[in-house]
Image (cartoon, rainbow, N blue to C red):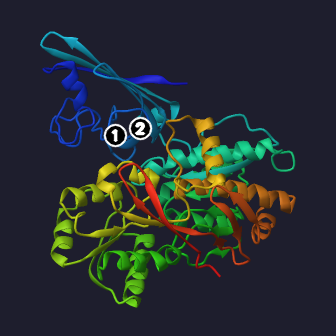
């Protein structure tokens, strides 16, 4: 159920076609934030006004949120365009809802009216309530509850909606196949807000209220570090599916199934050096464990191939101002950049990198550039390389079939799956397969059954080794203004 929580109206001294064309344009000033900035209404930013286009938005809160914030950064997608008259955007993160903006000719200009409809989750957030991990609903005794711990808000929030969609599709398929020994699977989505302490608190609270059978984690390594001791102590199977540092892959019921930094960089770094002829690297990333490992491994691999590092900077997750970093990169004499920025930090950095004119002379490898981040870059992302185990551009029968099922379930304008978010689909299927094989959804039995499992999914056949590592191929791809071009397939470095 949705409730209108924001209706705003203003008059612009411009004809409707000019007012309409301002929406989403960088650098304008306007009635939401008179000081100007990125865009003019909701600080919206997108490449072009057409259905399916992703938009970054900043939504003003009626009053300060739980952390004192007065506006929240999120994502939306344009679903309807009637030129010079009406735009409709569908919220994706941090909540679902709609924004309908109309442009009506009025004396001396245009009347602009914005109606924002928000779901119950949004109302909890805007009132500053603690916001339970999942709403209380009927607790069916036969349901097997699996948590999807992900980020719907905060610096990594742009991944969350697609991860939730992928997990929901997997649950639907598992249940269509009879569930787990006749019991249906239910996915409970938890938003960690890209904050480790929040992730731990909300997972623990939900487990105590609902008695979870397992957790699929699509979030930062920092949240994994905070949450994993609780999961291990409580015996919860915890399938952490995105890219990770690659150390201590499996402990008890904890599995790091995503690609390791070594898997990503071992072939990608020398490949970019060969193509570009460059030897000197600048390393830039966010200041937590995964980017720190990317920088350390990147330095080691570059030096193995007769390259060397001429500069390195780590910035806080969520930082968006990079003037001093860009000046340092420009002055360093680097030929190549290894960027281990994450989420909105990656988007803000790469936009500024492009605007500074550095893209034309420096090649960039960004191992966490995937569909959710690339589509917010548009032309600013042209030429960036990435190395991941899945891209939506994979031309295989398995991927084509998966994307058709995904679009049928969530619509043509739904956010595109990526390596980060498609992993939620595989993680839930792996849990279900292990529970069926074990004959029980209990933690120790599931953990034993997970080892040596195989699964044919959107990227073909993958398998979990006896050591808990996922055997999977890696793909080297180059970003364009509209997607990725897969350049090469590389085998995993896992034994």
Residue at numbered disc 2: 76
Q: How many marks?
A: 2
Is residue 194 something one can see in this rendering? Answer: no
Quarter residue 344 falls in: bottom left
* Left/right of residue 80 with respect to residue 465 in the rendered view: left
Name the quadrant of the N terminus: top right
- Which x, y percent locates residue 170? 68, 48
- At 81% from the left edge and 41% from the top edge, which residue is drawn? 141
Kindly state the secondary structure of the residue where label 2 is placed.
Answer: strand
Quarter residue 235 falls in: bottom right
* Left/right of residue 281 with respect to residue 207 in the rendered view: left
Up the image or down, 300 lies above or below 143; here it is below
Badge 1, how many Cα within 10 Å: few under 14, some, many 20+? many
- At 29% from the left edge and 74% from the top edge, which residue is drawn? 336
Residue at numbered disc 1: 57
Name the quadrant of the C terminus: bottom right
- Which x, y percent locates residue 492? 59, 75
Up the image or down, 103 lies above or below 217; here it is above
Kindly state the secondary structure of the residue where label 1 is placed.
Answer: strand
- At 22% from the left edge and 42% from the top edge, which residue is drawn? 26
Quarter residue 408 falls in: top right
- Which x, y percent locates residue 404? 62, 42
Dots 2, 1 in contact, CB < 8 A: yes
Of 119 and 277, nearer the camera is: 277
- At 62% from the left edge and 64% from the top edge, which residue is drawn? 230
N-terminal of the pair, mark 2 or mark 1, is 1
* Left/right of residue 70 with respect to residue 371 in the rendered view: left
- Which x, y percent locates residue 120? 52, 31
Of 103 and 48, nearer the camera is: 48
Marks 2 and 1, how far apart at CA: 7 Å
Instruction: Determine which of the numbered discs, if any, sits on residue 79 in the image.
Output: none
């Amino acid at each position: 159920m949705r409730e209108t929580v924001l209706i705003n109206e203003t008059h612009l001294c411009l004809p409707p076609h000019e007012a309409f064309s301002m929406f989403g344009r960088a650098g304008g000033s306007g009635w939401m934030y008179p000081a100007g900035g990125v865009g003019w209404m909701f600080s919206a930013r997108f490449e072009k006004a057409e259905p399916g286009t992703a938009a970054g938005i900043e939504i003003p809160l009626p009053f300060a949120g739980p952390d004192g914030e007065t506006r929240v950064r999120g994502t939306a997608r344009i679903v309807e365009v009637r030129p010079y008259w009406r735009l409709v955007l569908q919220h994706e993160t941090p909540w679902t809802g709609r924004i309908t903006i109309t442009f009506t000719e009025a004396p001396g200009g245009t009347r602009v009216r914005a109606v924002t409809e928000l779901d119950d989750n949004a109302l909890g957030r805007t009132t500053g309530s603690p916001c339970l991990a999942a709403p209380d609903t009927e607790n069916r005794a036969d349901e097997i509850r699996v948590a999807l711990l992900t980020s719907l808000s905060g610096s990594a929030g742009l991944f969350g909606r697609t991860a939730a969609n992928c997990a929901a599709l997997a649950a639907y398929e598992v249940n269509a196949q009879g569930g787990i020994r006749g019991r249906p699977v239910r996915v409970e989505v938890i938003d960690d807000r890209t904050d480790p302490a929040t992730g731990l608190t909300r997972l623990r609270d939900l487990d105590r209220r609902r008695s979870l059978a397992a957790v699929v984690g699509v979030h930062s390594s920092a949240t994994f570090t905070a949450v994993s001791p609780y999961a291990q102590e409580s015996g919860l199977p915890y399938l952490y599916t995105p890219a990770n540092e690659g150390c201590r892959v499996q402990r008890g019921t904890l599995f790091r199934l995503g690609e390791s930094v070594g898997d990503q960089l071992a072939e990608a770094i020398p490949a970019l050096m060969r193509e570009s002829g460059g030897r000197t690297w600048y390393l830039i990333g966010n200041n937590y464990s995964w980017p720190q490992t990317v920088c350390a491994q990147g330095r080691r691999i570059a030096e193995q191939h007769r390259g060397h590092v001429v500069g390195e900077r780590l910035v806080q997750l969520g930082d968006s101002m990079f003037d001093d970093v860009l000046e340092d990169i420009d002055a360093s004499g680097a030929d190549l950049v290894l960027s281990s920025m994450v989420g909105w930090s990656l988007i803000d950095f790469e936009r500024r990198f492009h605007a500074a004119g550095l893209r034309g002379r420096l090649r960039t490898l960004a191992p966490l550039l995937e569909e959710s981040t690339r589509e917010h870059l548009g032309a600013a992302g042209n030429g960036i390389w990435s190395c991941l185990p899945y891209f939506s551009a994979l031309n295989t029968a398995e991927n084509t079939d998966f994307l058709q099922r995904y679009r049928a379930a969530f619509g043509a304008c739904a956010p595109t799956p990526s390596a980060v978010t498609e992993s939620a689909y595989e993680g839930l299927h792996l849990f279900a397969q292990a529970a069926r094989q074990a004959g029980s959804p209990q933690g120790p039995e599931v953990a034993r059954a997970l080892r040596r499992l195989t699964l044919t999914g959107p990227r073909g056949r993958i398998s979990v080794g006896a050591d808990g590592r996922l055997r999977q191929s890696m793909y080297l791809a180059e970003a364009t203004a509209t997607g990725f071009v897969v350049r090469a397939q590389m085998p995993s470095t896992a034994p």
